[in-house]
Amino acid sequence: MAFSSSLAPFFPPSGTFRAHPARRLRADAPGRFVASCLPPPDVVVTREQGKNARLISALEKHNVHPLELPLIKHVEGPDTDRLLDVLRNDKFDWIIVTSPEAAAVFLQGWKAAGSPKVRVAVVGEGTARVFHEVSESDDQSLELAFSPSKALGKVLASELPRSNRNSCKVLYPASAKAGHEIEDVLSERGFDVTRLNTYTTVPVEDVDPLTLNLAISAPVVALASPSALSCGVIDLEIPAWHG
């Protein structure tokens, strides 16, 4: 079985997949799935429940039969409650956000803190989309001000503009499972970085056996992040997905 971490539109090689109308399993309740039909899937999509729609739509346009099997879910991190106080009581030159989930969690805290004026740097179009509605509204307190030349956290850290002041303060709300490369690079460049682990990723605890049996037969599994691999495939202990 092959793995893919890309959420870009999927273009199957000629003759690789069966030609049939795009059909999929649909979720009828959190953690439970019902089959609208039972053809073997071409690809399993594994993002959190409710966040696979864009990928599923792209696959179906190419008659690729997807199966939705969320392997992970996001939960509060150890610093979730601190975010509100930090935003209320401190000022930052930059807020850096590197994923859509980090963006969503940050916006919740930012609004609860009274929407203080902030300048945001983001990694990736998906992350930027989370901010667009707020940044394009009449309220100009949130400025979407920077994205790196490549959608990589380490590139953002190396390219983030620095003010002429002695201290340039950065708030980095992140997953508890994210590495430390971003803050390390920023610190080396002279930034004063505050990292808050505002969310984390855990495996889905209840997977429907019928859906899982179908998933095992798929030749491709689409993984959106390393945590999907570690939380999903390893914790489920599916032999076919380890080989």
Image (cartoon, rainbow, N blue to C red):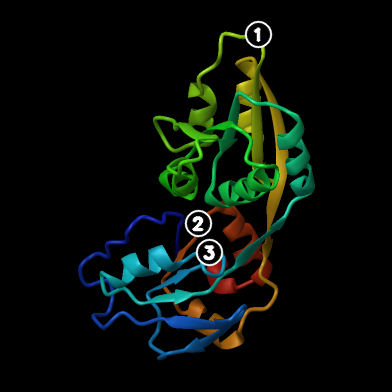
The first of marks 1 and 2 along the sequence is 1
Decide if residue 176 is in sight here: no
> Is 25 on the left-hand or right-hand side of 61?
right
Q: Measuring 64% from the left and 64% from the top, which residue is drawn there?
A: 73
Give the image location of residue 228, x and y in percent.
58, 59
Q: Quadrant of residue 110?
A: top right
Question: In the rendered image of this protein, does residue 74 appear above or below residue 110?
Answer: below
Q: Which residue in the structure is indicated by mark 1?
A: 166
**Residue bearing mark 3:** 47
Instruction: Kindly report the distance in space between the C-alpha atoms of the residues bearing marks 2 and 3.
Output: 6 Å
Mark 1: give few (<14), some (14-19) or many (20+) Cα within 10 Å.
few
Q: Earlier in the sequence, mark 2 or mark 3?
A: 3
Where is residue 111? Give x, y as percent.
64, 46
- The amino acid marked with disc number 1 is Asn
Q: What's under tag 3, amino acid-wise? A: Arg
> Depth check: 141 or 3 in front?
141
Q: Is residue 38 above or below residue 98?
A: below
* Label 3: element kind: loop
Q: Is residue 58 visible?
A: yes
Determine contact: label 1, label 2, CB under 8 Å: no
**Count of labels shown?**
3
Asked whether disc 2 touches disc 3, contact meaning CB atoms under 8 Å apart, the reply is yes
Q: What residue sits 27% from the left and 83% below the top?
A: 21
Q: Amino acid at mark 2?
A: Ala
Of residues 63 and 119, the one nearer the viewer is 119
Judged from the image, the secondary structure of the residue bearing numbered disc 2 is loop
* Gap in angstroms between the C-alphas marked 3 and 1: 42 Å
> Mark 3 vs mark 1: which is more N-terminal?
3
User: In which image quadrant can residue 197 be found?
Assistant: top right
Q: Residues within 10 Å of mark 2 (few under 14, many from 20)?
A: some
Which residue was labeled with disc 2?
224
